[in-house]
Image (tube, grey):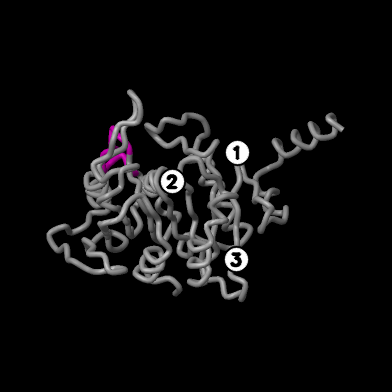
Amino acid sequence: MARSLLLCLLILMVLPLHLFAAVACGGPTPCRVLDGNYRIELPKDGDIRGAYVFFHGYKSSAELQMQQRPLVDTTLSHHLAYIAVDGIDGSWAFPHSARPGRDEKTFIASVFDDLRQRYGFTPDKTIVGGFSIGASMAWYTACQQGDKAAAMVTFSGVFWDPLPRADDCIADIPPIIHFHGTADQTFPLAGRSIGANFHQGNAYDSMAILRARAKCDVKDAKAITLDGIKCDDVPGCIRGDSIMCIHAGGHEAPADMLDAGLTAIGFPR
């Protein structure tokens, strides 16, 4: 029995990446890719127009994230598949994070590739998102491979110190909507120290980096309202507007904010 299990694991380790797409997944069955997995739920009416790829918060998982029904159901109502990507022991290994380990850039690239091969989700149909430390993972993903997504909607998490420079971002930044609360004590707008060696970044400085890389026209910034929240909308970016919404709440990712964000970036199309 143990020998058979070991043999199966060895086979999975050496399978070419494209063969993972031949294995059925969905529902309680994770979709396995190089160095990890993700979970997916599709709109039940069959009208599927894209995908929202979500990176979970600290101490969560793809399995637990799929139980966050308000976020999942809101995504499905926009005719988008909901994809929960699985971190490492409840965390992510982005630059300067407290959790070393997996090459997240390569892993996430394999997720994008699998979503395209298995479900046909090309970059123009893919939105990146995340909450807290998962939002940080989404920001680094936009910085490193933002060309693989049409937009980004994130909550309560940004870059970590030392912040990247604008020219450290090697991809054209997609349009972004970021929600962050003034009462957030877990990932404050100004950031905070985590132990002696790690520090969350400042949300305003982080947004300025993405806007600089996206060549946004900050002098033409305007105020808009999403879900009753006053937001700073900077147009004239390479690929679309950069929107930052500062609300009075805490560390949260409410479904109504997601609904407003997906609507503002034009999904469903």
Q: Upstream in the sequence, badge 3 or badge 2?
A: 3
Q: Residues within 10 Å of mark 3 (few under 14, many from 20)?
A: many
Q: Residues within 10 Å of mark 1 (few under 14, many from 20)?
A: some
Q: Secondary structure at mark 2?
A: helix
Q: Residues within 10 Å of mark 2 (few under 14, many from 20)?
A: many
**Residue drawn at (22%, 57%), measured in percent from left and top?**
216
Q: Nearer the viewer, mark 1 or mark 3?
A: 3
State if disc 3 and disc 1 touch (CB < 8 Å): no
State if disc 2 and disc 3 touch (CB < 8 Å): no
**Residue drawn at (60%, 41%), measured in percent from left and top?**
36
> Residue 134: which numbered mark, if any?
2
Residue at which label 3 appears: 42
Prevailing secondary structure class for the magenta stretch in the rendered image: loop
Residue at which label 1 appears: 35
What amino acid type should be assigned to the residue bearing mark 1? Asp
Q: Secondary structure at mark 3?
A: loop
Whether residue 182 is situated above or below residue 255 in the rendered picture: above
Q: Nearer the viewer, residue 125 or 194?
A: 194
Membership of 166 in magenta stretch: yes
Whether residue 164 is situated above or below residue 197 in the rendered picture: below
In which quadrant is the C terminus drawn?
bottom left
**Left or right: where does residue 113 sit relative to residue 97?**
right
Q: Position of residue 203 (x, y in %)?
A: 26, 46
Q: Position of residue 68 (x, y in %)?
A: 52, 57
What amino acid type should be assigned to the residue bearing mark 2? Gly
**Residue drawn at (36%, 68%), measured in percent from left and top?**
260
Marks 1 and 3, Cα distance to the nearest angstrom? 23 Å
Q: Upstream in the sequence, badge 1 or badge 3?
A: 1
Image: magenta residue range: 160-169
Within the image, what quadrant is residue 107 found in? top right
